[in-house]
Structures are given as C-alpha cells and as structure tokens.
Amino acid sequence: EGIQATGNPWIIDKIDPATVPVPLQVVITSVQGPYTARDRKLWTFLLHAVFDELGEKAIHSLSVREINAVFRELGGDHNTKWLWESAKRLAQTTVEWEATFDDDRFEQGISSLFGASLSKKARQTGTLNFNFPPMLIPIIKQPSRFARLRVHFLMKLSGKYAVTLYEILEGFANRRDGQCRVTIDELRTWLKVPEQSYKSWKDFRKWVLDPAIKQINDDTD
C-alpha cells in the first residue's frame, strides 16, 4: 500500500534500478546538523534496505561489512570506520517538516533524522542497529510530495553539492512541465551553501552549480 521502493539496494542493476521515495524540500523544510553528502547517501541506502519494515520493526539490523561492500563497489572506502562516523552524524541531525495527509490533517513537527547504536559491542559484532524515528516514518511513507531517487546513482556522486542537487532535480523531473523554478536564495539554502560563500551569481554558478551539474551529467546512467 502507498508509495513503495523498487529494485534491490544490494544489487547494482541498470535494467531494474533500485529507487526509493524521499520527501521533498517542501515537506522537509529544515535540516540542521553535521551531516555530509556521504551521510545523505548512507541514509538513503539504509532507507531503501528496510523500507518494507518501516512501522513494523522498532530496530533494524544490518551487516556493516555488507553495507560497505555495496559502497565499495560504487567507488567508496574499503575501511568501515567511515560508516560508524556517518551514523553518528546522522543521529545528531534534526529535521523539521510540514505535511498534509490524506485525511486533510496538516501537521508540523521536528525530529532526529536517525537513531543508531554505537556501542563497543555493536562495533565488535559488525552489526549496525538503527531506526528511523517513529514520528518521521509517516512523513517518509506517505509524503505529500516526494522524489524517487536512484539509490546507486546517488551513491556514485561525490561532489559536495551534486548529491543534494540530484535529489532536488529528481523532485521536479516527473512534474507536468518537468521544470525546476526556484530562487537563487532557495537553492542556496537547499544546497546548504555557507552564507558568506559564493555570494555573487558568477561565483555561485562557477563553484557550486556548474560542477554539480557536470558530475550528474557525466554519469552515463
């Protein structure tokens, strides 16, 4: 029922790509925390991996080695240390949302983005025990507007702003006119460009927008 993920996040398949729906910026209105582009990729991958379990299981458990194997196949790090650090940053990140549900309820809220066990025992067993906060699950499972992301395509992107720009553009790709119309200030906010950086349009385009667009377009997938 409702919006579903497609494909298999554990198998890289161009014919049947792994895709997962994520709420758009108009739903997730603010994200505050130390998270990075790599953290966003991990969050998206884990979301797809347990999408069918959301709301059914309180805690999800996955092998760190197996998670890292998929990232490594797409050009990631061989060492799994990054994954624990990434999980910690995700757990320190908060999100605010505004959502209208099918029964016309309008809700606003704030929640952590992620939860994870980072104990010594968990690290020793190589198992990541994590959850998506209960208040956030209805927003994820039934967003009023969402983008369907290609998980492995996203994981291959490495540019600082390419990951977020790809997420934004996928949100507009399936609209009736297929066009993205936002103000520069909105785009700067969504991309989390530091307030004092690239203030002129020329610099913003040269150092933020053009490199991100090039990396997205350079991938033949």
Image: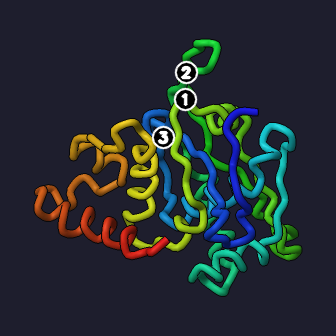
Question: Where does the image place residue 204, in percent across and percent down from the top left?
Answer: 19, 61
For the N terminus, the quadrant is top right
Marks 3 and 1, how far apart in space? 9 Å
Residue that protrudes farthest toward the top in the picture:
104
How many tags in the picture? Answer: 3
Q: Are marks 2 and 1 in contact (CB under 8 Å)?
A: yes
Q: Which mark is residue 100?
A: 2
In the figure, residue 121 lies in which quadrant?
Answer: bottom right
SS category of the residue bearing label 1:
loop
Question: Reading the chain from its start, which is encountered first: label 3 or label 2?
Answer: 3
Residue 87 appears in view? no
Identify which residue, 178 or 23, lies in the foreground: 178
Q: Secondary structure at mark 2?
A: strand
Instruction: Give the farthest residue toward the front.
Output: 15
Q: Residues within 10 Å of mark 3 (few under 14, many from 20)?
A: many
Q: Amino acid at mark 1?
A: Ser
Q: Spatial distance from mark 3 to mark 2, Cα to Cα?
A: 13 Å
Residue type, numbered disc 3: Leu
Q: Earlier in the sequence, mark 3 or mark 1?
A: 3
Between residue 201 and residue 34, name the one nearer to us: 201
Q: Residue at x 54, y 29 (%)?
A: 144
| Residue hosting label 3 | 24
Where residue 207 sits: x, y (%)?
22, 69
- Answer with left or right where residue 131 lies relative to residue 168: right
Q: Horizontal placement of 164 versus 182: left or right?
A: right
Amino acid found under the numbered disc labelled 2? Thr
| Residue 144: image tag | 1
